[in-house]
Amino acid sequence: MPRLNAQDKASNEAAVRAAMEQILRDLPPGGKADLKTLAQLSGVTRTGFYAKRNRDGTSRPGAYQHVAEEFTARVQALQDAGEIVDPRAAQLERLKKENADLRDRVARRDGEVAKLTEFRILAISRLAAQYDEIERLRSLLTQQDEADDVVTHLPSREGNAPFGSCS
């Protein structure tokens, strides 16, 4: 690949800066606020945004690495200021918050269900104990009635028994 001359490098950098302003102003559909979209919009290869290695192992900056660092710094500054450039990032943050809220609600509901289940078990056991006590008392009453075969009946007054007051 041939090396860039100063004029080509300057025009490419101008294209990168124009693409950067476009992304920061109005994100194109399907794009993100990242270096890949910046490279696509400017028509420059992405490798120019990253540091290179010389054959001797030393590193040198990429042709447009300073512009990439400026871009990421501006995106971060806008996000820190509360103006989110990337609507996907905003949606992701909203969904994360909503997910956390839903997890809290589910945890609270699980606690309520556990309490209600415990109460239901307690109520059923109390009802069963009360039913057993009622059955025990009924059986005692029927056993007592069977033991008392002799029932004393009071004589009834048939005839002229006055009804009402005695006066």
Image (spheres, rainbow, N blue to C red):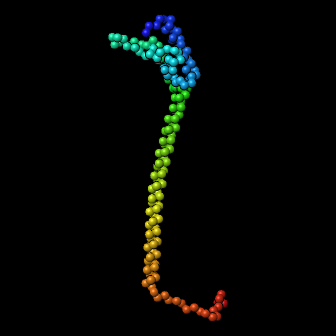
Write down the quadrant of residue 30 in the picture.
top right
Residue at x 44%, y 77% (from the top left corner): 140
Above or below for 151 versus 130 = below
Residue at x 49%, y 8% (from the top left corner): 9
Residue lying at the far bottom of the rendered structure? 159
**Front one among 60 and 152:** 60
Residue lying at the far left of the rendered structure? 56
Residue 158 shows up from this direction: yes
**Front one among 160 and 44:** 44
Measured as percent of width and height from the top left, residue 130 is found at 46, 68
Residue at x 43%, y 80% (from the top left corner): 143
Residue at x 53%, y 34% (from the top left corner): 94
Above or below for 49 versus 133 = above
Measured as percent of width and height from the top left, residue 100 is found at 49, 38
Residue lying at the far front of the rendered structure? 1
Q: Locate residue 104 relative to residue 52 in the image: left or right.
A: right
Above or below for 108 versus 69 = below
Measured as percent of width and height from the top left, residue 161 is found at 63, 92
Which quadrant of the rendered structure holds the N terminus? top left
Residue 73 shows up from this direction: no
**Front one among 7 and 40:** 40
How many numbered marks are there? 0
Which quadrant of the rendered structure holds the C terminus? bottom right
